[in-house]
Image (cartoon, helix red, strand yellow):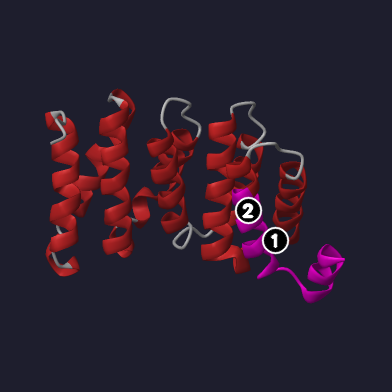
């Protein structure tokens, strides 16, 4: 039995309600749910923030068309959570949420640039989370990337080869696999050689 704070329980309950409610029924209240979650996420403990990220991702998956007005705030919220050094769970949920969000965002290249910059941190947990987020972005919307973004990601992957951390190497390999799927054939052949 896990004892959770009332705020954590409330966020998880909201997520559960969203999962069990039809999109049509959510239409009228999604703004009243999403806005406050975004506003309070910074003020709470790690467990509460992780639960709120889960709820926001559930909302994004369930009714993406109704949260479009919140995309800039959601992107900032998720990116901040990726850089949080205090919790792996928070970073993992943020990476997953970015993967969901990117399918709705029209501007993918700026996010990629932000994630690449974030991956240059000395904190290995944050660096791995940034790589996971890049993997989510490339996997879900890689076809929308410009050549500059592809080259930035190749540079990050090249740096991962020097890591001693197995988890980072695995994430880098997954990112490379996703990137190969959107690179031109000639570039892919050069990488393999």
Is 176 included in the stretch rendered in magenta?
yes
Range of magenta residues:
170-193
Specify the label residue 109 is tagged with: 2
- Check contact, mark 2 vs mark 1: CB within 8 A: yes
Is residue 29 visible from the viewing direction of this image?
A: no
* Residue for point 48% across, 39% down: 79
* Residue for point 79% across, 69% down: 188
* Residue for point 17% across, 56% down: 18
Q: Is residue 18 above or below residue 91?
A: below
* Residue for point 69% across, 36% down: 164
Residue 29 image position (x, y, % from top left):
15, 54
Instruction: Give the class, few, some or many, for how many residues have Cα within 10 Å of label 1's Cα (few <14, many ≥20).
Output: few
The residue wearing badge 1 is 146
Give the total of numbered labels.
2
Separation of residues labelled 2 and 1 (CA atoms): 7 Å
Label 1 SS: loop
State the quadrant of the C terminus.
bottom right
Residue 58 image position (x, y, % from top left):
28, 55
Residue 106 image position (x, y, % from top left):
52, 60
State the quadrant of the N terminus.
top left
């Amino acid at each position: 039995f896990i004892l959770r704070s009332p705020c954590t329980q409330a966020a998880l309950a909201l997520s559960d309600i969203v999962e069990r409610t039809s999109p049509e029924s959510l239409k009228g209240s999604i703004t009243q749910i999403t806005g406050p979650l975004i506003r309070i996420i910074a003020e709470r403990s790690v467990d509460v923030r992780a639960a709120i990220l889960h709820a926001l991702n559930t909302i994004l998956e369930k009714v993406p068309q109704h949260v479009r007005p919140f995309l800039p705030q959601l992107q900032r919220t998720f990116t901040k959570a990726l850089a949080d050094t205090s919790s792996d769970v928070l970073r993992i949920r943020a990476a997953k949420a970015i993967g969901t969000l990117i399918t709705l965002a029209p501007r993918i290249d700026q996010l990629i640039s932000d994630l690449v910059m974030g991956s240059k941190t000395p904190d290995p947990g944050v660096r791995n989370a940034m790589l996971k987020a890049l993997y989510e972005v490339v996997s879900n919307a890689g076809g929308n990337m410009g050549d500059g973004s592809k080259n930035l990601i190749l540079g990050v992957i090249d740096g991962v080869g020097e890591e001693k951390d197995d988890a980072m190497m695995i994430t880098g390999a997954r990112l490379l696999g996703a990137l190969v799927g959107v690179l031109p054939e000639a570039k892919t052949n050069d990488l393999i050689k």
